[in-house]
Amino acid sequence: MTYRAGWIHFTNVAPILDSLVLPAGVTAITGVPTEMNEALLSRRVDIANISAVEFIRNADQLEALPDFSVAVLGPVYSVNLFHTRPLPELRRIALTSQSAMSVALLEVLLRQRGLSPVLERAEGTAEELLAAGYDGVLRIGDSALREWYGVVGPLTPETTMTSLPHTARAPSGLHITVTDLAEEWFTLTGHPFTFAVWAYHKDNPPPPALVQAMREARREGIGHLAEVAGRHAQKLGLPERVVQHYLWNFRYHLEAPDRLGLTEFAAMAVPGHAPLRFGPRPGAAVTTR
Ligand SMILES: C=C(O[C@@H]1C=C(C(=O)O)C=C[C@H]1O)C(=O)O
């Protein structure tokens, strides 16, 4: 029988997916987070890297691989609230329909500050939506990374990703502030933020050969990060330095601090959720080439 995988194929997963050789009997489709969340929950796929909040909401049915995550400690650069007034004055925020996780994170962060702007789904670039009358726009993934750089870039020999400003005059003439939600989470909690986990239904775990292939692909990707970044910088139309820093910054192993961030977020966003369950840890055996 075929085992079906569903991959969110944003650049941040390239260090795992680019070198992945699917074992015999495994097929894969790709899509944006909300599509993969739905595909897993409706069992159109058997495993997917999904928005961590959907894993939490469906913890009674799902289990996650114990050592795979898309997480960061501090800024992520691609989960951004673009806004034209200070956060406490925001009245209407446009949300992306691609994301479940960033919406849940934004809701937690707004609640912590006692803010309750209107949140509504709307498509378009941040600049288009801000020009159309929204005072905040939430965007994720590759386009959010590009739009962030379009507002606060360019990098010069004297600057680094972390020294770029948060507010700048965009090409449209609007003064835009970019609030990085993972950085806000870090300020609030001091923990990493875990955006995605690799989840499957408890009764249908992945074949060990697939998990082994994923671990090998990740080792290959992280071991050749400059090459991965170089390829994707071209596709994204961004400087290699930007994509290298962006990828190097991710935490892909769901380590103890990433789980702590995940459980802390779960308690805030989905009170009363079922216990989070993870598959067996990889054995001590290390493969060498
Ligand atoms: C950091 C990101 O993580 C992704 C964001 C997700 C979401 O917002 O639902 C889901 C999976 C992650 O891989 C990003 O794509 O910018």
Image (cartoon, rainbow, N blue to C red):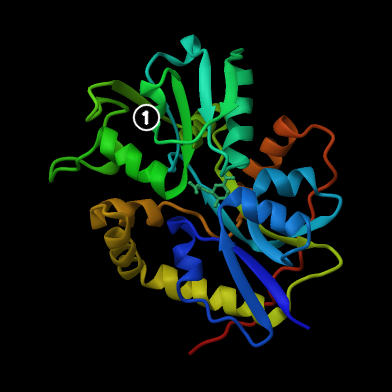
Q: Position of residue 252 (x, y in %)?
A: 53, 59
146 sits to left or right of 46? left
Residue at (22% x, 22% y) in the render = 173
5 sits to left or right of 236? right
146 sits to left or right of 239? right
Q: Position of residue 108 (x, y in %)?
A: 63, 27
Compared with 54, 187 (above or below) is above
Residue at (64% x, 82% y) in the render = 285
Q: Amino acid at mark 1?
A: Glu
The part of the image, by quadrant, that contains residue 255 is bottom right
The part of the image, by quadrant, that contains residue 47 is bottom right
Residue nearer the viewer, 76 or 78: 78
Compared with 218, 188 (above or below) is above
Residue at (25% x, 28% y) in the render = 170
Compared with 141, 86 (above or below) is above
Residue at (57% x, 37% y) in the render = 102
User: Residue extending furthest left?
Assistant: 157
